[in-house]
Image (cartoon, rainbow, N blue to C red):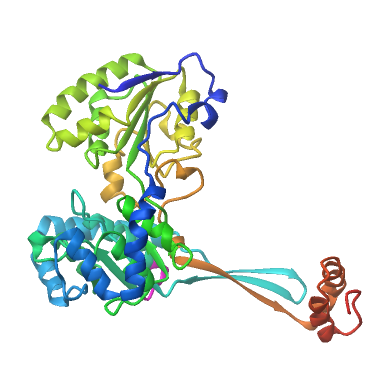
């Protein structure tokens, strides 16, 4: 069922991006093209505020809302109406995520660079964060947990959640999303989706004050709007279609490998699934399992599209080559179902998250592992990490020097200021410590 890419006979050293960029499949997210569509929407929101959001919501979502703010009673009702099983699952997911993200909090550090001279690194949260929770093919209450918990742990004082309104739910976001917000104590939720929601968060409207940073995944129009507003606000990343790579050898259970490929393909027809194996026999067995599991899947059509589109099975000679292929692809999720999985995981350089062994499927990370499921896509794991507490923090240097420490470095400032022809820089120091610098004009 999966297209085969045969890289046997090629050494790991040669299996880098230069060799594989045009060989390995991946759905392309044309954010640049989408910019033309979202620019007028965002500009309209910048100029007209809430009225523009209302017009866009009516046009794109088929809902006419007098205001975006979800009433507090609707949040409380959604939480009260949540099934006990889902409530318990969200509570446990939040507990585990909070533990992991609390461990990420960096401590302030004080460095004495000389006697009487210190530089302190302080980590300060943004004042206000916007969280976008998508509402496309399915509802994502788990995304509320994954975005809100790191912001809360970081100490963000105000968190505003935006999620698309649904005609079938009285023009409000999905009740499960509202319930998750209420569970975490988020009281500011807006019924707004797409580019207009990002513009609302970034520029602010009569209903929603502007935020400092926007996090959360979405479709290509959300990604384009985030790119457009970058600079006015911070963003976590431009999320593209989801993806999984699985490194597996002859020891892997083909049924489990197939189940994980199907689970990822279930997200989106543009999901990319890559099986990397040293065993052609396993590839055959996985294909057999896929034919059975896909036929029985609830979302068969989108799974078939994903597996037939930007998905493949890559055959390699050894584990080193398998790791090289995975690093060249830089997947959002990387599973390792092979002998010595933990050792192989320690050698991975490019992945949003790594799942080790047969009992750590990506589905675990989506919900209950405690790790964050907002991860870099499209190969951006080469330079970007997943959502974390650090997303919502800024490092600020606090510099303290006494008179003696400043006098000690004054000659160096004389030299550097003179070399850069910045006499006032030199004089600003000499005014404090005396003497004349070489750059005085």
Residue at point 40%, 25% (across, down)? 339
> In the picture shown, does residue 106 fall above or below 348?
below
Q: Which residues are magenta?
A: 152-157
Q: Check residue 403 for magenta coloring.
A: no
Front-lying residue, 13 or 88: 13
Front-lying residue, 195 or 41: 41
Q: Position of residue 50 (x, y in %)?
A: 26, 75
Q: Quadrant of the N terminus?
A: top left
Instruction: Please indicate whether residue 136 sits to the left or right of residue 15 in the image.
Output: left
> In the picture shown, does residue 7 fall above or below 188?
above
Instruction: Please indicate whether residue 365 sits to the left or right of residue 80 in the image.
Output: right
Please tell me in which quadrant of the rendered image residue 277 appears: top left
Please tell me in which quadrant of the rendered image residue 76 appears: bottom left
Residue at point 51%, 67% (across, down)? 394
Q: Position of residue 41 (x, y in %)?
A: 32, 63
Instruction: Please indicate whether residue 308 sits to the left or right of residue 108 in the image.
Output: left
> In the picture shown, does residue 350 fall above or below 15?
below
Please tell me in which quadrant of the rendered image residue 72 appears: bottom left
């Amino acid at each position: 069922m999966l297209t085969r890419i045969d890289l046997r006979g090629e050494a790991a050293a040669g299996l880098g991006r230069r060799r594989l960029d045009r060989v390995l499949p991946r759905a392309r997210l044309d954010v640049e093209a989408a910019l033309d569509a979202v620019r007028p929407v965002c500009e309209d929101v910048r100029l007209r505020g809430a009225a523009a959001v209302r017009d866009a919501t009516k046009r794109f979502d088929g809902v006419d809302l007098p205001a975006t703010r979800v009433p507090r009673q609707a949040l409380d009702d959604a939480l009260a109406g949540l099934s006990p099983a889902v409530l318990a699952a969200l509570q446990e997911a939040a507990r585990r995520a909070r533990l992991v993200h609390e461990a990420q909090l960096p401590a302030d550090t004080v460095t004495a660079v000389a006697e009487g001279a210190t530089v302190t690194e302080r980590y300060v949260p943004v004042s206000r964060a916007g969280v976008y929770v998508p509402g496309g093919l399915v509802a994502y209450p788990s995304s509320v947990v994954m975005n809100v918990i790191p912001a809360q742990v970081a100490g963000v004082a105000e968190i505003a959640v935006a999620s698309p309104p649904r005609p079938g739910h009285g023009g409000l976001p999905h009740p499960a999303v509202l319930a998750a917000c209420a569970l975490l104590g988020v009281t500011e939720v807006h019924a707004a989706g797409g580019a207009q929601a990002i513009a609302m968060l970034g520029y602010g409207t009569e209903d929603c004050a502007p935020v400092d940073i926007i996090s959360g995944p979405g479709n290509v129009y959300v990604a384009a709007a985030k790119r457009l507003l970058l600079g006015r606000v911070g963003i976590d990343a431009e999320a593209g279609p989801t993806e999984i790579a699985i490194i597996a050898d002859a020891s892997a259970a083909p049924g489990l490998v197939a189940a994980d490929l199907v689970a990822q393909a279930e997200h989106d027809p543009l999901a990319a699934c890559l099986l990397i194996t040293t065993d052609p026999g396993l590839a055959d067995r996985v294909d057999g399992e896929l034919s059975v599991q896909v036929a029985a899947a609830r979302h068969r059509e989108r799974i078939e599209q994903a597996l037939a589109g930007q998905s493949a099975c890559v055959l390699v000679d050894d584990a080193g080559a398998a790791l090289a292929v995975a690093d060249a692809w830089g997947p959002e999720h990387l599973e390792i179902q092979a002998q010595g999985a933990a050792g192989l995981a320690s050698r991975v350089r490019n992945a949003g998250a790594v799942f080790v062994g047969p009992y750590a499927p990506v589905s675990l990370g989506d919900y209950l592992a405690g790790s964050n499921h907002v991860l870099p896509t499209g190969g951006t794991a080469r330079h970007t990490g997943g959502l974390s507490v650090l997303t919502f923090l800024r490092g600020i240097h606090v510099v303290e020097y006494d008179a003696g420490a400043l006098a000690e470095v004054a000659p160096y400032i004389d030299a550097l200021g003179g070399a850069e022809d910045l006499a006032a820089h030199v004089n600003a120091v000499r005014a404090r410590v005396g003497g004349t610098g070489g750059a005085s004009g």
